[in-house]
Image: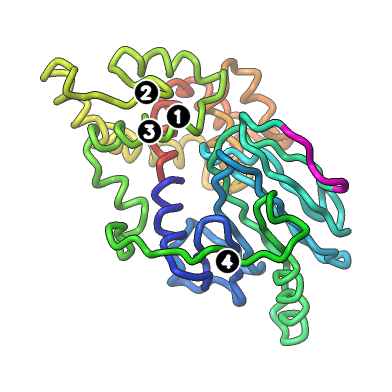
Amino acid sequence: MEMTRRVMTNVAAPGGSSAPLGQLARMRAYPTAAFRAVVSPNADTLYVSGWMDVSKEPMVLTLPATHDRYTLFPMLDGWTNVFRSPGMRTTGTGQQTYAITGPHWSGKLPAGVKEYKSPTALVWMIGRVYCTGTKADLAASHAIQDGVKLVPLSAYGKPYAPAPHAVDPNIVMNVPPVKQVNAMDGIAFFTLFAKLLSQNPPLPADGPMIAKLATIGIVPGRPFEPSALNPAVRAAISAAPKTGQAQMLAYGPSLSKSSMAGAYFPDSVITARTTCCAASSPSTISGLTSTQTPSIRRLQNRLTERRNTSCILLKVCCLR
């Protein structure tokens, strides 16, 4: 999330899939095969997305009436968990206004504004507007995109123009975020990880993992000080990403062969990837899907057996 945010917000003005922090990017056409900003984008929706930092002030998101068109506007926290997803299926197609607040915010909101509290300071809203691709439908979809508004709470109901945004020349823009994360050694990775924890607190279910991380000096709200560690521990931490990546690569083929049985279950797999981090018992995983096919049951069994390992590896992925 963090590395993707850096790349996608390091622009002077909105354009394509990128926009400065607190502003909206409106993609006017379907993603092409060359699109690399995110993995597996939709092929039949137009995107409107925005990154937010709600640590100091809420952001107000206004959604226009969509006239029975299918839309959804999922909001991801700093751990990639979807904490709210307004849209046709969940909240209808009328005009809606939401204040996205940080985990520690409290206050009064204007009339007609509903609070969506994020568990973390970092939020990514990835809106999708269904479009048939015809000239007339593209125009109608663009109008819906234009009707989506995002402003700080202090500017809500007032004329607002975002402040100029300076591009940071130190951010690498020509290397995909996943490759930038994979290139980090453990010291760099966990230094950034500890910094992000201060504004993006882990879930209560992550308590056992947080306790383990504390034994090597990684504590939410405190900077990581690798110089205070035993040299052997520092060396092990430095090498940890390569070890973890090798485990993930080795585990992937066995999952596809023994658990997926040649079938393709994108929603179930995505749900499993998100849920297994917080799973504290097999019963949590058993509720992933109502389609209890043999392949899904094998997937659930494998996730139950490997959830502790998955939690470690998937939390490492969260920086992406």
Task: Tell me whether circle 1 and circle 2 mark residues in contact (CB < 8 Å).
Answer: yes
In contact (CB < 8 Å): disc 1 and disc 3: yes
- Mark 2 to mark 4 CA distance (whole Å): 34 Å
Counting from the top left corner in percent of width and height, residue 196 is at 42, 35
Q: In the visual, does 206 lie left or right of 182? A: right
Within 10 Å of disc 3 (Cα), the crowding (few <14, some 14-19, many 20+) is some
Query: Mark 1: few, some, or many residues within 10 Å (few <14, many ≥20)?
Result: some
Going 56% across and 50% down the picture, which residue do you hit? Answer: 52
Question: Where is 139 relative to 226, above or below?
Answer: below
As drawn, the label of residue 198 is: 1
Q: Secondary structure at mark 4?
A: strand
The span from disc 3 to disc 4 (Cα, nearest Å) is: 27 Å
Q: Earlier in the sequence, mark 1 or mark 2?
A: 1
SS of the residue at dot 2?
Answer: loop
Read off the magenta span: 107-112
Is 293 or 229 nearer to us in this picture? 229
Q: Which mark is residue 222?
A: 2
Q: Which mark is residue 25?
A: 4
Q: How far across and down, in percent of the image, does residue 23 sit?
A: 58, 61
Which of marks 4 and 1 precedes in the sequence? 4
Q: Quadrant of residue 286?
A: top right
Residue 107 falls in image quadrant:
top right
